Amino acid sequence: MKLPFSFLKPKKDESEYYLALILTDEKVGSVILKAESGTLKKINSFEAVFPDSLEDLSIEELVSVVDKAISRAEEILPPDVQTHQTIFGVKEHWVDEESRRNQDRVLSSAPPRCAFADTQCGPPSL
């Protein structure tokens, strides 16, 4: 007989998790963020160094190193939790001018809605 005692069941984590992927010339940083009570909290991070400069990497090398960084950062997540939203930090010249104008317009009109554990509405430190 199954009794309806919901307090005996483990509570499912309803939090939202984000993956921040930061690319520089020398390395890739992967950060897992958890949204809680209107703030983003850094859960885990991992950095992987590129064998060559980012500009000189083949697609296969880039995918391999980025995959390693993401996998290592996500190791801490429970098996049933996935990151469905990604924040990219890339070189400025990778983004076209129209996208930058749209981003500037949105950012300048929106009030700050986040607070990182160590800084107010700034990028997470790796």
Image (cartoon, rainbow, N blue to C red):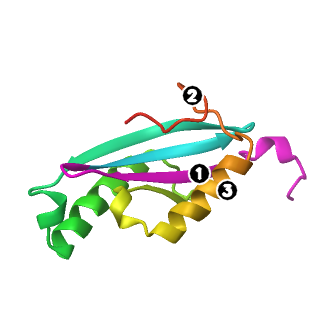
Considering every residue shown, the one lying at the far top of the view is 118
Left or right of 114? Residue 19 is left
| Viewer-side residue, 15 vs 3 | 15
> Distance from label 3 to label 2 (Cα)?
24 Å
Q: Quadrant of the C terminus?
A: top left
Q: Is residue 83 magenta?
A: no
> Distance from label 1 to label 3 (Cα)?
23 Å
Mark 2 residue type: Ala
Considering every residue shown, the one lying at the far bottom of the view is 59
Let me know if residue 21 appears in the view.
yes
* Stretch in magenta: 1-27
| Residue at mark 3 | 106
Q: Nearer the viewer, mark 1 or mark 3?
A: 3
* Figure check: 67 above or below 125: below
| Viewer-side residue, 26 vs 34 | 26
In what element is the residue under mark 1? Answer: strand
Let me know if residue 13 appears in the view.
no
Residue for point 73% across, 38% down = 38
Q: Quadrant of the N terminus?
A: bottom right
Left or right of 13? Residue 83 is left
Mark 1 residue type: Tyr
Q: Nearer the viewer, mark 2 or mark 1?
A: 2
Q: Nearer the viewer, mark 3 or mark 2?
A: 3
Which label is found at residue 30? none
User: How busy is the neighbourhood of tag 3: few (under 14 within 10 Å), some, or many (20 plus)?
Assistant: few
Residue for point 9% across, 56% down = 51
| Residue at mark 2 | 117
Mark 3 residue type: Val
Left or right of 31? Residue 46 is left
| Viewer-side residue, 11 vs 103 | 103
| Residue at mark 1 | 17
Q: Earlier in the sequence, mark 2 or mark 1?
A: 1
